[in-house]
Image: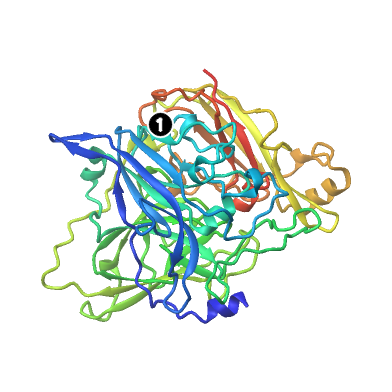
Amino acid sequence: MLQQVAGSLQMYVDPLPQMPKIRGYDFQDGRVVPVNLTIGMFQKKWKFHRDLPDTPVFVYGQCVDSATFPGPTIVARHDVPLAVTWENHLPDHHILPWDPTVPTAIPGSDVGVPTVVHLHGSAHPPQSDGSAFAWFTAGFRDTRPSWTQATYTYPNVQPPGNLWYHDHALGLTRANLHAGLLGAYVIEKPEVDVPMDLPCGDDDDLHLVIADRSFNADGSLYMNSTGAAPSVHPQWQPEYFGEAVTVNGKAWPFLAVRRRRYRLCILNASNARYFNVSLSNSVPFHIIGSDSSYLAAPVTVPSLLIAPAEIFDVVVDFSAMSSSSPATTTEVEMLNSAPYPFPTGTAPGPLNDKVMKFVVAPNGPHDTPDNSTVPEREVPYANVASPGTPAPETTRCIAMYEYVTAWGQSTHLYINGLRLEDPVTETPRSGTTEAVKMQQLVGLQAFTDCMTRVNDAVKCGVDQHAVGPVVAVPEHEKTWKNVVKVPPGFVTTVVVAFKLVDTNQPYPFDATAEPGYVYHCHILDHEDNAMIRPLKLLP
């Protein structure tokens, strides 16, 4: 039925919308000054496709009428703090199924939809991090002991780049994001951004928020109501994959462009699906940034693998495409070739192997000339091995593993065999640099078979797995990232700086305060059950 509904929708009939922008600063007497914003969470109807009935969603906005799927793009200014009061106006009950048997935010009397907002990729005080335990319901009627404050403060002291905000409530992250609680966030720094002469302006600098979704015949969002191991978890499944691909809240939209350069900020906001995107006419992507940082220098690639929660900042030059005549209109598809689950799953089919279409029109006589560039160099601090970057003081090791029933049904996923609520074991000192070796054991059949028998990672020879030759890090991922791909059967080593990476200075706030931070798998279904652990910085 889900394939039938998605397959009935004609592709490329809805124009790609751009989300409304909210400026997170103001001007006073020629100076940039801070502002306070109030952004709410609302239930409303959203039109995902011309031929699909209106869909109930949860969305962010300054009022219900202006709320969108995804939410408004917040544009902040470097070193200008932004205060946001996040208000929950959601109904008493969720619009999607959820599972109370995984560690979950459950309000008193089961009334209300718990939410809490996390600004993904931001350097901010723990009280404004959006702890999974700091959730609240409508009107702050129900809050938890870890709830800290109604207004969050974002210092915006980190380098310029692309972030996103989304819900982070315990056990409900996958359902709340699926319903629509997500949006883009940009930190601008004119003295860094402007000299690069990148494409700019509302027409040439665009966000593409990609998310797979399935729809019921009545237009409502589909989320499974039966779990992978229903005797253990009635509803939870280890990965959600949708039949339709939405971009900025439209299923397979199109975008009219000219023969010029465009800057595209591509965010994969899917629960579990990877996207390996390419353009059907082989025009390459010039990658200028990854997650919330520029690169040291642009990298040109024919295709781009984007994990859930990962962001890439790219320039596409439609003037460079081949055509029989520059005076003709050409159609270019954005395609997807990533198997699901990635990397060894099913190849995408005729629905989810397409993302959107660009309709490339010839330049008109009144079009402004394209003076944008792809710069040869960007920012020196993006080079993790650059002079002045301290060597890691400590190396930590973490292992990610999936527990299954005797019949191979997934039941839960832990990091180092521990739950979120278990005592904190990662306690780096604020201001230091560490190395972290992440061992991905999910999906390794030999290890799984042994764990099923003895449930002891040491006896199962955990140190004998994920061995082999070193694989080079892709050039376009060599920067300070907040999402790292960790393939099954690999040990991925990352350098983590618990300070400002562009200046090597400590955070200008108390990063050691309660309730601390977390690190986790960003496959949302894994995160909710319960591949997430606390991170507590020490003085």
Indicate the quadrant where residue 439 lies: top right
Q: Is residue 217 above or below residue 16?
A: below
Relative to residue 270, is residue 21 drawn left or right? left
Query: Is residue 350 in sight in this rendering?
Result: no
Picture residue at 75% right of the left edge, 54% below the top: 233
At horizontal 30% and vertical 32% (from top left) the residue drawn is 79
Could you tell me if residue 333 is visible in this image? yes
Amino acid at circle 1: Val
Residue name at image x 52 percent, y 34 percent: 495
| Residue, disc 1 | 501
Q: Is residue 522 left or right of residue 99?
A: left
Q: How is the image coloured?
A: rainbow
Q: Is residue 148 above or below residue 230?
A: above
Question: Residue 236: x and y, percent?
Answer: 69, 56
Q: Residues within 10 Å of mark 1 (few under 14, many from 20)?
A: many
| Residue 483 placement (x, y as % from top left) | 51, 45
Question: Image check: 378 left or right of 326?
Answer: right
